[in-house]
Image (cartoon, helix red, strand yellow):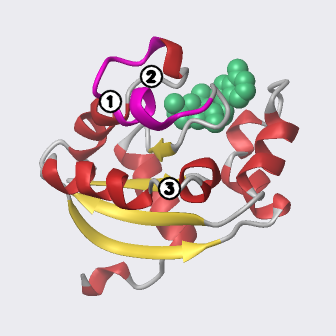
Amino acid sequence: MATNRTFTMIKPDAYQAGNSGAIIKMIEEAGFRIVAAKLTRLTPERAGEFYAVHKERPFYKDLCSYMSSGPIIAMILEKDNAVADFRKLIGATNPANAEPGTIRKLFAKSIEANAIHGSDSDENAAIEGAFFFSGMEQF
Ligand code: IDP
Ligand code: MG
């Protein structure tokens, strides 16, 4: 089912660097409405669950320790064409390949510590949102 929602996390590097406010400003100025938001911290186990699709990848263990290294801000966002438009706003996984003006180009430190997450499909947006938030029907 197509939806107008996506899921994002401001990752530990961006939170730690004090870039959360600037990133949220870019998100809102791009026309996304924040439907739910939570400052939280993942354990390595929960990070592993979130990124289970990558468990055979060589970077999986490092990714789980990085994603549990500090607070994150999890958010559900709403906009027409949310998933695709948000992936465009954040830019490529590797900031070296990200378009100028994208969040990752501006704020990512490396291919791993790349500032922000964005869902890659409507289906995953729903799954990932439910991973952090319950009872979203009320919003
Ligand atoms: P995405 O976040 O752009 O969707 P994915 O391929 O789904 O990228 O990878 C999930 C996360 O794993 C990335 O955002 C990044 O933090 C990390 N990652 C991806 N590829 C690499 C890599 O080659 N080395 C180290 N970390 C990586
Ligand atoms: Mg991905």
Q: Which residue is mark 2?
A: 92
Nearer the observer: mark 3 or 1; the answer is: 1
* Contact check, label 3 and label 1, Cβ < 8 Å: no
Q: Using the image, tell me which numbered label, if any, was put on residue 102.
A: 1
* Segment colored magenta: 97-109
Nearer the observer: mark 1 or 2; the answer is: 1
* Cα–Cα span, label 3 and label 1: 15 Å
Residue labelled 2 has its Cβ within 8 Å of some atom of ligand 1:
yes
User: To which quarter of the image does residue 111 belong?
Assistant: top right
Q: Is residue 99 magenta?
A: yes
Q: Identify the residue at image location x=25%, y=56%.
A: 25
In the displayed structure image, the side of residue 56 where residue 100 appears, left or right: left
Q: Identify the residue at image location x=64%, y=37%.
A: 113
- The x, y position of residue 125, in whole percent, is 41, 52
Amino acid type, residue under disc 3 in the picture: Met
First in sequence: mark 3 or mark 1?
Answer: 3
Amino acid type, residue under disc 2 in the picture: Ala
* Cα–Cα span, label 2 and label 3: 15 Å
Q: Is residue 107 magenta?
A: yes
* Contact check, label 1 and label 2, Cβ < 8 Å: yes
Q: Nearer the viewer, residue 106 or 65?
A: 106
**Mark 1 nearby-residue class (10 Å; few <14, some 14–19, many ≥20):** some
Q: Which residue is mark 3?
A: 9
